[in-house]
Image (tube, rainbow, N blue to C red):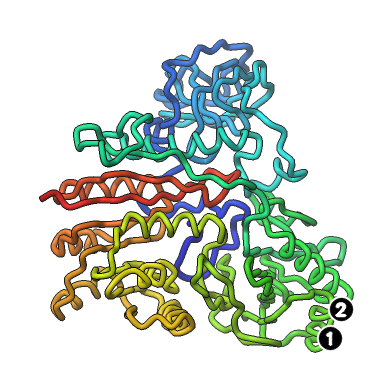
Amino acid sequence: MSKNKRRGGASAGKPQGGALSGQKRGGMSAGRRTGEAALGQSRGGEARAERTSAPQAGSKRSAALAALPVEKNGEYTAEIIGIGHDGEGVGRVEGFTLFVPGALPGERVRLKVLKLKKQYGYAKLLEVLESSPDRVGAPCPIYDKCGGCQLQHLDYAAQLKVKRQLVVDNLERIGKLKVADPLMHDIARASEADGIVVYPTIGMSDPWRYRNKAQVPFGEEQGGLVGGFYAQGSHRIIDMEACLIQHANNDEVIAKVKEIGRGLGIRAYREETHQGLLRHVVVKVGFRTGEIMVVLVTNGKEIPHAEEWIEKIRAAIPGVASICQNVNTGRTNVIFGPTTRVLWGREVIYDYIGDVKFAISARSFFQVNPVQTEALYGKALEYAGLTGGETVVDAYCGIGTISLFLAKHAKKVYGVEIVPEAIEDAKRNAELNGIRNAEFAVGGAEDVLPEWQRAGVRPDVIVVDPPRKGCDERLLDTILQLRPERIVYVSCNASTLARDLRVLEDGGYRTVCVQPVDMFPHTVHVESVALLSLNL
């Protein structure tokens, strides 16, 4: 899922293309696992490397750094043997690991060392000496500046293989779990001795224009509004006309709002001075319904020329069903503030996942790739193995997306979520779909599940869909006490998935299979659905 995947406002400090993603929470740092899990895709033994040039020794170094086989600002040639968890190439010089953005496995490159730590370093790609057959030209004209996507230069079929391998590596290295031979795809035949079946990643037939939500920061350039993305490593906003992973309507709406705001003399918020009005424009579009919501995030309640702005937006954007204002006066990089009001139209727009209809408000979480969400939740439903008589608990239920999918096939579904607004949305969505066998509660799953247990609830299946930090330790303990027949784990972070599967396996469960799903093409992020069964 992005990946501010859940809970609260999204961070404004990262561009929206990748969620994402970076965006690591808790657990082990997914970017740098000191040459262990971050090198998971690296399989090919030691890379050969040659020193091509090196500057004279600079300032005094620690003994540890002085003993390294590379020097800062030194230039080397190396073979790239893997992809790291932030999408950079992984190479080794005399056994020392270097992360090289832009390099791909199988390539021989010339690089310059920029930064050194005791166990790994960072390098700049100077030249590709031998190119990978999987290298392609990135179609996005701002790919090298934005940072929202990390893998546009890698062929899409190869991206899917990389993402499966990322899951495998985390299971093996962090979870210390055995993975079955990659040709083993029949879980009915796979035994515990064979290991966990990890299927090929489910990809998209068209991996572009898949995002249904844009969150665009605004600034000023030469006195006029600009809206786009943060330059890498800074809060400087670079104007952008199009993003190839956004729904085309999102690009069009951002351009129109920008144009109208410029014409009305609207000033952008300035982080340094805490002055100005417009901080972000958030656009949500219903893929199935075509409905559009525009949210103006402002540094204050008053909007100059508000009526004129609203009328111009309505005239310029066919399909707009809701125009909202969110007020955020905090000195923060969190996008949303606590107050949202409707300026025109409805409080929500509607869209579907499968045959389930959802109401989507300005701040409610809704998966940004509805096409792949249907694949993800369909797999969760399959793994739940429902026949109509089961009691199911959906921990981290959000606005009820998975709960309502399951409720159509179960006797009873209980959903729990710590965000009160999300539970209100879940109840509304259940009513919207005429679903009466789903019950929702506010609170931490680790607190609410014991209460349900004392009330006599005995789940046959527990579904967890936690944020990037994974499941709370107390929740895992509670699950092990409840001992449901099956656990379905929906994950947006392969490292915390592996960590939690290890705990559940030690507690008496067997991980049968894991299905990676590519929710965010051209980024390094991958979602997974895992099936665990109770050892009897």
Which residue is painted at 60% across and 42% down in the image? 150
The residue indicated by pointer 1 is: 308
Looking at the picture, how far across and down is residue 256, in whole percent?
Answer: 82, 69
The residue indicated by pointer 2 is: 264
Indicate the quadrant where residue 384 lies.
bottom left
Image position of 160 (left or right of 444): right
Tag 1 secondary structure: helix
- The residue lying furthest to the front in this view is 387
Between 307 and 124, the one lying in front of the other is 307
Which residue is painted at 53% across and 55% down in the image? 372
Residue 147, above or below 248: above
Evaluate if marks 2 and 1 touch, with contact meaning CB atoms under 8 Å apart. Answer: yes
Number of marks drawn:
2
Residue 477, above or below 323: above
Looking at the picture, how far across and down is residue 486, in whole percent?
Answer: 23, 57
Looking at the picture, how far across and down is residue 519, in whole percent?
Answer: 52, 52
Between 310 and 383, the one lying in front of the other is 383
Q: Return the disc, 2 or 1, that comes first in the chain's sequence.
A: 2
Indicate the quadrant where residue 502 lies.
top left
How busy is the neighbourhood of tag 1: few (under 14 within 10 Å), some, or many (20 plus)? few
Type of the residue with mark 2: Leu
Q: Is residue 330 visible?
A: no
Residue 243, above or below 49: below
Type of the residue with mark 1: Glu
Q: Nearer the viewer, mark 2 or mark 1?
A: 1
| CA–CA distance in space, label 2 to label 1 | 9 Å
Image position of 161 (left or right of 509): right
How busy is the neighbourhood of tag 2: few (under 14 within 10 Å), some, or many (20 plus)? some
Looking at the picture, how far across and down is residue 397, in whole percent?
Answer: 38, 69
